[in-house]
Image (cartoon, rainbow, N blue to C red):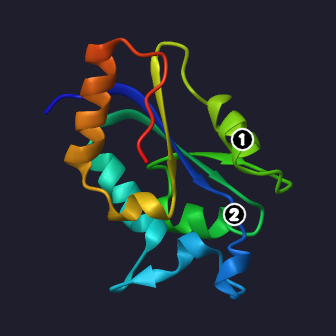
Amino acid sequence: MGKNNFSAIILAAGEGKRMKSAKSKVLHEVSGQSLIERTIATVKDTHSAQIIVVTNKKNISEMKKLFKNQVLYALQSQPKGTGDAALIGLKGVKENIPVVCVMYGDDTAFYQAKTIEKVYAKHLKSKAVATFVT
């Protein structure tokens, strides 16, 4: 399959307070692999044009260890919520990429690449301004 012309912004800056753990939620493991690793693997399988991981100060070094230069990083220096994290990620999107897909670093770990690709194709076909998956 060829490259899809969308930028994937992965929101992974949350502190995971509800997990009652010092470790951020996206770094927790399921079957030996962190949620963020699963998410990135799924998104890589979509052959998106660009992957931007929005992370926090606490996790940036861990993310760089995990993914090196496979993704771009955007730092949310202060936790101001999902909208702010998405805005920070948008600043890294290349000008020639017409579609942006914003995903959570934890929940997307349980998607399949073909699901993301189907939503992308439906979005293009419908000529929608925005498409949401819930």
Q: Is residue 131 left or right of residue 15?
A: left
Mark 2, residues whose alpha carbon is within 10 Å: few (<14), some, or many (≥20)? many
Residue underneath mark 1:
83
Mark 1, residues whose alpha carbon is within 10 Å: few (<14), some, or many (≥20)? few
Task: Decide which of 20, 69 is in the foreground and name it.
Answer: 20
Q: 126 above or below 117?
A: above
Instruction: Residue lying at the far front in this picture: please name it.
Output: 134
Count of numbered circles on the image: 2
Q: 19 above or below 78?
A: below
Of mark 2 and mark 1, the one earlier in the sequence is: 2
Checking the image for residue 14, the label placed there is 2
Identify the residue shown where x is 48% and y is 16%.
129
Instruction: Residue lying at the far right in this picture: please name it.
Output: 78
Q: Amino acid at mark 2?
A: Gly
SS at mark 2? Answer: loop
Identify the residue shown where x is 41% and y is 42%.
133
The quadrant of the image that shows the N terminus is top left
Instruction: Residue lying at the far left in this picture: please name it.
Output: 1
Mark 2 vs mark 1, CA separation in Å:
12 Å
Identify the residue shown where x is 25% and y is 26%.
121
Q: Amino acid at mark 1?
A: Gly
Which of the 4 image quadrants contains residue 42? bottom left
Residue 102 percent location from the top left of the image: 52, 40
Q: 9 above or below 127?
A: below
Which of the 4 image quadrants contains residue 5? top left
Task: Decide which of 55, 68 is in the foreground and name it.
Answer: 55
Q: Is residue 44 left or right of residue 23?
A: left
Task: Decide which of 127, 11 is in the foreground and name it.
Answer: 127
Identify the residue shown where x is 63% and y is 30%.
90
Q: 12 above or below 100?
A: below
Residue 69 percent location from the top left of the image: 49, 50
